[in-house]
Image: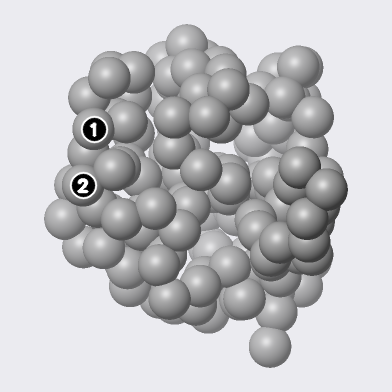
């Protein structure tokens, strides 16, 4: 089963840099979940910094942000500290969330086939219903586009 636009995202719990994250606890305001391939890589660093820079504007709109990758908690804690990220990072080492959101793809890295996360972002409304999704994200301009979508939920 994967998530579908216009439908509620099933509740889940997962370890995060701030303790256990439970989707149902995030209801009451918009939630932006961004999936990224790997901590401390150039594109993922740029994307996370962009979300961090815009964090106050998301918060003004009542939205929360969480990042998700397959990295372990030690890596997430170091990445969060290094970039001073004002939001939590979820560890999905068993790929349960990646499968739920359908973000694991076959890719080519240095000429070799690999399975990895396709950079993707999902916007849930205050009731946990999936309202927007962005797949195959290119980092430049992405945060502004997601912020506009959050503001359109009002």
Q: Position of residue 66 (x, y in %)?
A: 43, 44
Q: Could you say whether the residue bearing mark 1 is in a helix, strand or loop?
A: helix
* Neighbourhood count class around disc 1 (C-alpha, 10 Å): few under 14, some 14–19, many 20 upward: some
Is residue 55 visible in the rendered image? The answer is yes
Q: Quadrant of the N terminus?
A: bottom right
Say above or below: 41 vs 52: below
Judging by the rendered image, the residue that carries numbered circle 2 is 74
Q: Could you say whether the residue bearing mark 2 is in a helix, strand or loop?
A: helix
Is residue 23 visible in the rendered image? The answer is no
The reply, left or right, for residue 134 in relation to residue 95 is right
Q: Identify the residue at the far left of this view.
A: 19
Residue 92 numbered mark, or none: none
Find the distance from the CA under tag 1 to the CA under tag 2: 6 Å
**The quarter of the displayed image where residue 93 is located:** bottom left
* Neighbourhood count class around disc 2 (C-alpha, 10 Å): few under 14, some 14–19, many 20 upward: few
Name the residue: 76% across, 73% down: 4
Judging by the rendered image, the residue that carries numbered circle 1 is 78
Name the residue: 29% across, 30% down: 80
- Residue nearest the observer in this picture, 25 or 136: 136
């Amino acid at each position: 089963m994967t998530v579908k636009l216009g439908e509620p995202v099933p509740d889940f719990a997962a370890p995060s840099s701030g303790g256990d994250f439970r989707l149902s606890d995030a209801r009451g305001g918009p939630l932006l979940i961004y999936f990224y391939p790997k901590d401390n890589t150039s594109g993922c660093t740029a994307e996370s910094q962009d979300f961090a820079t815009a964090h106050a504007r998301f918060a003004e709109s009542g939205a929360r942000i969480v990042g998700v990758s397959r990295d372990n908690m030690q890596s997430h804690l170091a990445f969060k500290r290094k970039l001073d990220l004002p939001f939590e990072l979820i560890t999905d080492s068993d790929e349960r969330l990646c499968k739920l959101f359908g973000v694991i793809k076959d890719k080519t890295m240095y000429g070799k086939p690999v399975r990895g996360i396709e950079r993707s972002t999902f916007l849930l409304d205050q009731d946990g219903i999936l309202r927007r999704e962005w797949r195959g994200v290119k980092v430049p301009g992405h945060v502004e586009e997601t912020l506009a979508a959050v503001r359109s939920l009002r």
